[in-house]
Image: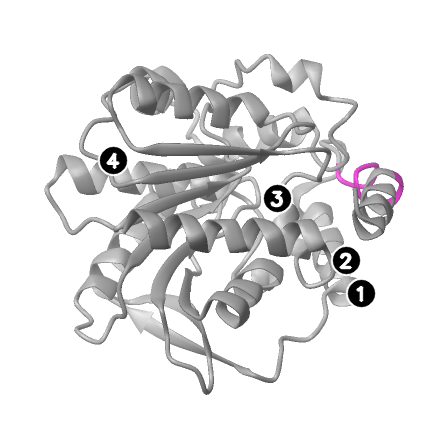
Amino acid sequence: MSVQNFLLKKFLRESYKPKFSAELSLEESRNELNTILNDYMPEPCHSLHIRSEDFAGINCELISHKDRELKGTFFYVHGGGFSMGSPESHRGVTCEIAKEQLYQLIIPAYRLAPEHPYPAADEDLMQAWLGVMNDDNLTKPIILGGDQSGAFLAFQLLLELRDNKLPMPDAFVGLSGLFDLNLTAESLELNKDSDCVNQIGLFERGINDYVPEHMHLSDHFQAPFSTSLKGLPPVLLQASDSEILLDDSKRLANAIEEQGGHVRLELWEDVPSCWHIAAIGLPEGRAAIKKLAAFVKESC
């Protein structure tokens, strides 16, 4: 474990995790997240060009290197429990990918719950994706992915693209993904103390905000482990062995492999959930992003 990882975990366990509980109102949680970002998130690297652009009416943040040739395009869906987060909140990972791996990042500002429950986010992501696919200047390969709840939304988009025979990405990447909205994973209980970031109650509240009251989870959101996973592009799943969402990535990887798909599961020892966001100062984060790029290069 690097010194940086030790210090980050100590900060998250003592200062971050206690503040983010289901006892906070949604407004308080959003304000707390913004405060942490303003206090601790460094300014983007000067070598990056960051701008806003609409794709089919959906505002997206675009991040790319100013001077070097692009090596691909990454359609990145930010997490935040369906009700928090933004393209700006996840610049810790998106800027690092753009700077170090020379992908152009496209991060949609999809509508958040509970103001905009299902299917608002899903519709925004599909609309933005199809708008992006109409851009003849995209650099390939094209990667689709996200972190935590963003990984769920991105994977649902992937399945919808496949089912409707729409343009598919060349690879899918899930970082500390939440894939089972029924929250049945054993790791939710087993890792509740070792996870220095997440609390189950926050995911429960976010899911309840995202799914309208009149809908039942089993009606529209079957865990992907129990559906057809054939016809997917290569899939990379990265997760921490100490996070409560660990089993979601393990179960999805097993299901894809059992159905003959191309999947790689990478488990990282004793790092925070979605540690990639701290990559600018965290060796483990930069290493994970390098392995992400290596997977794409090998698979596409």
Find out whether residue 23 is within the magenta segment: no
Structural distance between the alpha carbons of marks 4 and 2: 34 Å
Q: Residue placed farthest to the bottom in the image? A: 67
The three-letter amino acid code for the residue at tag 1 is Asp
Q: Which residue lies under the disc numbered 3?
A: 274
The quarter of the image holding the N terminus is top right
Find out whether residue 19 is within the magenta segment: yes
Q: Provide the secondary structure element on which disc 3 rests.
A: loop
Q: Which residue lies under the disc numbered 1?
A: 39
Q: Which residues are magenta?
A: 14-20
Do the numbered discs 2 and 1 sit on residues whose CB atoms are within 8 Å? yes
Residue 11: image location, x then y, percent: 86, 47
Q: Is residue 158 above or below residue 222?
A: below
Q: Residue at x 17, y 73 (%)?
A: 136
Q: Residue at x 44, y 25 (%)?
A: 213
Q: Is residue 212 above or below residue 94?
A: above
**Closer to the N terminus: mark 2 or mark 3?**
2
